[in-house]
Image (cartoon, rainbow, N blue to C red):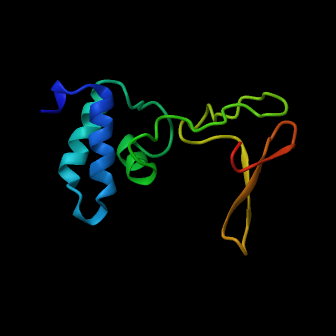
Amino acid sequence: MASALTDNELLGMLDEERKKFSRSNEELMRHYVDELIARRVYPTHWPGPDPHARMRCWGAYWHLYREPLNCPHCNADLRDRKSGPPFKREIAHSDRRLDCTTHHSCPDCEKTWGRGG
């Protein structure tokens, strides 16, 4: 079934299944992840959690870095090349009163930017 789908169709189906949470079909999601690993859509060479755990934590599109990929001030690469996606080198700063990230900073130049990039 899954082998007849494109990578994007399979990612979309996995994303929808994961969004169901308590009604999700764990066996079906494991099958989709295994298929994405076999197709080399999901990398397996990163240290830390395996692709199944990363998908459960960060969703079907965990293997893609989120923007911005470079510091808006010094253009430093913010992707974490040791741990792989979705991890980045940017530093998130939060406000306990607001219970959210308020801005980010670059580990290289230490300049900051707002949540939107």
Q: Residue furthest bottom?
A: 97
Q: Residue 86: x, y in percent?
A: 54, 41
Residue 31 placement, left or right of 105: left
Q: Residue 7: x, y in percent?
A: 31, 27
**Residue in front for this viewpoint, 35 or 113:** 113
Q: Which residue is pictured at 27% across the width and 34% down the height?
A: 10
Q: Residue 71: x, y in percent?
A: 77, 34
Q: Which residue is pictured at 18% across the width and 50% down the height?
A: 27
**Residue in front for this viewpoint, 77 or 45:** 77
Q: Residue 59: x, y in percent?
A: 41, 48
Residue 64 placement, left or right of 12: right
Quarter in which the C terminus is drawn? top right
Quadrant assignment, res 4: top left
Quadrant assignment, res 95: bottom right
Q: Which residue is pictured at 87% across the width and 43% down the height?
A: 111
Q: Which residue is pictured at 67% across the width and 36% down the height?
A: 68
Q: Residue furthest front?
A: 116
Residue 55, compared with residue 3, is above or below; it is below
Residue 31 placement, left or right of 104: left
Quadrant assignment, res 109: top right
Quarter in which the N terminus is drawn? top left
Numbered label tally: 0
Residue 77, compared with residue 50, is above or below; it is above
